[in-house]
Image: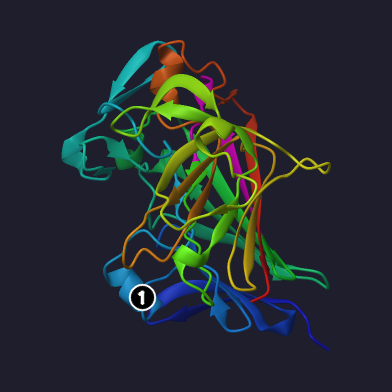
Amino acid sequence: MQTYSARLTSSDDVAIVRLRGPDDVVVSIAPKIGNNAYEFIVNGKNAFWFPFGSVGDFAANPELCGNPFLAPWANRLDEHAFYAHGVRYELNRSIGNYLSDPDGQPIHGLLLYAGEWEVVDFGSGPDSAWAKSRLEFSRFPALMAQFPFAHRIDITYTLAGATLEVRTEIRNQGAETMPVSVGFHPYFQLPGSRRDDWSVQLAASSLWDLNERFTPTGTKSPLKATFPGAADMPLRGEFLDHVFGDLRPDSDGWARFSVHGAGERLTVSYGDGYPVAVVYAPSGEGQQFLCFEPMSGITNAFNLAHRKLYPELPTVRPGDTWTGTYRIAAQGF
């Protein structure tokens, strides 16, 4: 009888959690490398783009791949500072714990490859296997120096069939309301076909207008004005690095973005907490991946909210918890 299992183990001296389901579906998570789920293997094929021969190689020289978590800001800030409650908090570049994009903008937060995560629970039952990891943000001075809001983050990966659910809980441990601008940057691949033969379905009604540095201006345009074929759009010849708004949920409340190729399909379902979808699909040789990114808010949300251009910025009150959930489903692998 095929069953689910969850195991805390190691590979190449790197601690990993391995979730296994029927039909040999396997999810591998590296808690000490940003709590990144770098494998989602279905019938021997990895749905995550992972350009390494081993998790040891990943640990030795990490780069964006798998399912990175972006916090305490997602994607870009348009200056080396952010605003909250009318206060300007300047980032300390000398600490060296964040990256900048080619235009010099801070990008992807502080936790891409963070080793501060601890596995606090894992297990399995008749229908699923799961693992929960926790990062006590407020315990680490180098993190608090950049984002001085005390909080705790729990991320739970749950495997059920060929679907991987990712649930994030952020508990505000401080005395002030905390702004929330987080997300994930999963890198997907369809091993059976090339990127130019993929098509996407975009479950949104609008696009946030971007400036030349790929940060939103605070205005939106109708999706059909830019992508009239969004219901089933070939990727050949398209470069995507867009911020989608006004997501269109199905009758069950989940908004579904999908990519399909020669018989394979990946669907990312956006649930509670994720009203924004960034889609990144660079073109060119070697760019054999696509990212459907669940976001709690638009890029540069903190600073646009301060300028009264983004009133939708989520916040969490002292003692309360923000939650966000999305799912990845593989078909035809």
Q: What residue type is labelled 1?
A: Phe
Say which residue appears at 43% left-offset and 39% top-offset. 74
> Quick one: which residue is furthest to the bottom in this view?
1
Residue 36 is left or right of residue 60, and the answer is: right
- Residue 310, position as x, y percentages in the image: 50, 18
Above or below: residue 213 compared with residue 235: above
Residue 72 is left or right of residue 258, and the answer is: left
Say which residue appears at 51% left-offset and 74% top-offset. 193
- Residue 101, position as x, y percentages in the image: 25, 42
Residue position for label 1: 52
Within the image, what quadrant is residue 156 found in? bottom right
Say which residue appears at 58% left-offset and 48% top-offset. 154
Front residue of 7/98: it is 98
The quarter in which the N terminus is drawn is bottom right
Q: Is-magenta flag for residue 11?
A: no
Above or below: residue 105 compared with residue 326: above
Residue 30 makes an appearance in the image: no
Above or below: residue 292 compared with residue 265: above
- Residue 83, position as x, y percentages in the image: 37, 19
